[in-house]
Amino acid sequence: MRAKGLIPSPSAHLRKRLAASARAFSATARNPALLRAQLAFGATWTAEWAFTVAIAVVAFRDGGAAAVGLVAFVRMAPAAVLAPFGTTLADRFPRDRVLVWSCLIRAAATATAAAVLAAGGPNVAVYVLAVIATAAFTMFRPAHSALLPALCRTPLELTSANLVRGLIDSLSTLLGPLVAALLLELGSPAAVFATTAALSLASGALLLRLSYESSPRGRPRPLRRIVHETVEGFRALAHYRDAGLLIGLAVAQTLTRGFLNVFLVVVAIDLLGMGAPGVGVLTAAVGAGAVASSLGASMFVSGRRLAILEGIGVMLWGLPLTLSGAFPHELAVLGLMFVIGVGNALVDIGLYTLPARLVPEELHARVFGAKESLIALSVGLGSLVTPFAIALLGIRGALAVLGLVAPALVALAWRRLQTIDASIAHRDKEVDVLNKVGMFRPLPMPAIDHLALHVEHAHFTAGEDVFHQGDHGDRFYVIEAGEADVIGDGRLIRTMHSGDGFGEIALLHDTLRTTTVRARTPLRLYTLDRRHFLSAVSDYGSSAREADTLMLDRLGSFDPRSRPTG
């Protein structure tokens, strides 16, 4: 018999999870800038799915299945090349402006395509405009991924934001094709293109004049360096190996997505005998799994073990393919496609949260742009390889073999994924303590995350001095645990507790220490050197104002007998 009150009841556990889910969504709802960015993402992604359906219909009417494949390739190939180049701009200029321009270019291209199609113009012009629209769209997600951390204050808020965006992504996967189907039934592809243009304009309008404090960009760099900066996104994946590993696993997932693009058609028509409608049914099962997983994941939004969750998600892309070959029955395959959708949502939470914390903020857009390029190439490669595998091994053999690629890579990386999660969990604790300091509280999440990365630890016994009045000051301190007394000219001024920071006056005014700080109890401190402290506080106006207010208050409460020098 379990002891009453020691083990939570199932209903209490469910209530706790539902509360966590509510917090995930309320974190977005309470942050106006974040909410607008999320709605803009939804409008953009719904437009892309609707546009993809409509352009495929135009191509099919023009030249059958071969034309559909050719147009899809022609749309993606330039995008794979342009994505890292275009997103480099988002590391040079305010990211919300880059997103607005992406929306405007896409709206203009799709509106013009609608006009050409409605007027009976040449389809070649429509395809050229589709390439332009796709290239502009390809810039959107990496730039949006780089913007989100700047709109958040805590790691938990960033995880929640990516979880909400994952749900929006899943819903758009269902809503976009449904909108296209309705408009195609009532009108024509031109009507879908016009709707895509309207949604793109709405997305751009939502992103106008976002209220947030962007990180300093330093001196403007010559445009001739943009090619070099584009390559830096790929170099960063090699330099920041943990981020490179996570994005590498995402490439394994999208390689499997390339396999799936072909298998959905072949399995539905040749293996299961479901006919052409079966392709849509299997695809819808993937979308349904993604929506269900996004909703379920909101109950586990603690931000812990995100690397492991991504690994599990990548495995869930491959294993269902292998099992589909082993159990080629309609209901079984439908369920397995649902599982693939579940895996998709798990991948996205970790993929868009962790690299943003493992790579310096000034490289975010370039890294996500490099990821977008690799993903486009891997989808194409997966689609290209699959027909050869089917010819060599048969449908069931190809499913079995290709489905094992992603799980095998995750198995090789498993221990490193555990290490990444442990490192992030440790940093989260440091961020929680730093967020208690008034002058750090206004900082955007990337800035305080960067501070946590450079935290050092110090311990003092009761009665030991941290520094003395008149000492040279080179570090800022935050109390992790314990109490400390502030002593000026031999008298007690105040007592500080966990979450209090001190030592800023000497650093900001470049003077000597104005007081002595002594451990009242055993003391555990976080310390930051002058360079990292000043770069955080001085480079952000909101933080600098908080620091000025705090200094005036502290200097007002104690005036040293001699001329103040610290």
Image (tube, helix red, strand yellow):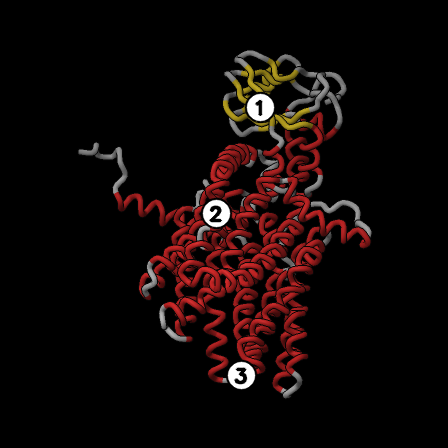
Between tags 3 and 1, which lies in front? 3
Between tags 2 and 3, which lies in front? 2
Q: Nearer the viewer, residue 82 or 363?
A: 82
Q: Quadrant of the C terminus?
A: top right
Three-letter code for the amino acid on which mark 1 is drawn: His
Callout 1 secondary element:
strand
Q: Is 544 above or below relative to 367? A: above
Q: Residue at x 55, y 69 (%)?
A: 47
Three-letter code for the amino acid on which mark 2 is drawn: Glu
- Identify the image quadrant of residue 427: top right
Q: Nearer the viewer, residue 509 or 25?
A: 25
Q: Is 92 above or below relative to 480? A: below
Per the image, the residue denoted by label 3 is 188
Q: Which mark is residue 457?
A: 1
Question: Cα distance, mark 2 to mark 3?
Answer: 40 Å
Per the image, the residue denoted by label 2 is 310
Q: Nearer the viewer, residue 290 or 164?
A: 290
- Which of the marked residues, 2 or 3, is nearer the chain's N terminus? 3
- Which of the marked residues, 3 or 1, is nearer the chain's N terminus? 3
Q: Nearer the viewer, residue 471 or 327?
A: 327
Relative placement, left or right, of 539 versus 431 is right
Query: Residue 286, position in %: x, y?
Result: 42, 62
